[in-house]
Amino acid sequence: MPLFGKKKDKPENRLEELLLGASNDVTKRAQFYKALLDSDVFCIGEPKGSTAPDKEGSFQTTENTEFSFYAMDLKGEKVGAIFSSLARMKEALGDDFKNARWIRTSARNMFKAIHPQLPRIFLNPRCSFGHEFNDKEIQLVIEGRLSELDSNLGVQSRGDYETRQPQELPQAFMDVLMKYFDERGDIADAFVSEVSVPSRNEPWHLMFGIRLRNRAKTRFGEILAGIDRIAKAKLPSDKRMVDIIEVVSEANIEKWFGQTQPFYKKN
């Protein structure tokens, strides 16, 4: 699950805990999606008509409530911006937060309102951690098709996945990636395989396993954000589906990467 930003802030709620967990472990995506469908999220806006805000200054809406929302400018593009908590909204808006009006409603209602007008929707843009939803994710959330967002509501077993040696590695991407690892100096070694989930028709794509030299000193979210930037710069748009996990034991490595030797090892 692509995650952008640095994980410097503590999660405010269960949804944020699961977002951070899902970014590091592909087996936890189902829990995040389920929590998303069950959670209220926030956006900048207000309902149409004469509706009074609650004591926090927000507007709680239902499925039939019409509301206007404000697009956020992100690198010159207008995007849909939703937030998993008011803390994340404050982080994104800074001093402008004190004068903002916001909507609180279910994630499904929010996507229904925003997606027809803005195809790109970001959870927690300009924040220390967040996620960009692709078109398929948005549509499945709107339709409540949780089984297709992930085929198992619990943690999936290794048997639900298929792994294999990469058929072809994008060399330009790999070269920049290894240079990035060298510059950081905090990565012990890294592994790569290809993974697929046939039960949800997920195509074969690259999976990277990163082992840190010192987990106490390195934020894994920083590494995720760096790899995400490199992928966007060096991979074609149809090849940017990349899973990244932190490996912490030999058993972890064998589970996902078999007998593969690391493609990168710190000298």
Image (spheres, helix red, strand yellow):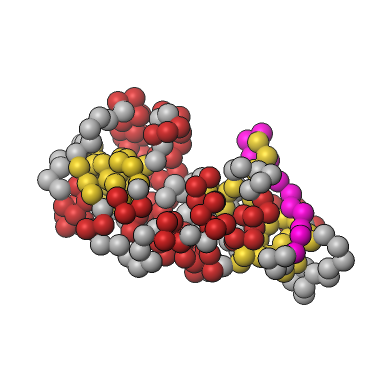
Give the residue at the far left of this rendering.
259
Residue drawn at x 75%, y 64% as measured from the top left: 65
Residue 125 appears at what percent x and percent y?
59, 48
Q: Quadrant of residue 180?
A: top left
Residue drawn at x 79%, y 61% as measured from the top left: 47
Residue 3 vertical placement versus 61 (above, below): above
In the foreground, 32 or 93: 32
In the foreground, 146 or 263: 146
Residue 133 appears at what percent x and percent y?
52, 48
* Left or right placement of residue 176 versus residue 45 in this view: left
Tell how many labels: 0
Residue drawn at x 23%, y 36% as measured from the top left: 166
Give the residue at the far bottom of this rendering.
55
Residue 94 appears at what percent x and percent y?
69, 53
Asked whether residue 180 appears in the rendered view, the answer is yes
* Left or right placement of residue 245 versus residue 9 in this view: left
Asked whether residue 11 appears in the rendered view, the answer is no
In the image, which residues are magenta?
A: 65-76
Residue 191 vertical placement versus 50 (above, below): above
Quadrant position of the C terminus in the picture: top left
Give the residue at the far right of this rendering.
50
Q: Quadrant of residue 193?
A: top left
Residue drawn at x 55%, y 58% as measured from the top left: 143
Residue 93 appears at what percent x and percent y?
69, 52
Q: Is residue 255 shown in magenta?
A: no
* Left or right placement of residue 168 versus residue 57 in this view: left
* Left or right placement of residue 150 versus residue 266 in this view: right
Give the residue at the far top of this rendering.
172
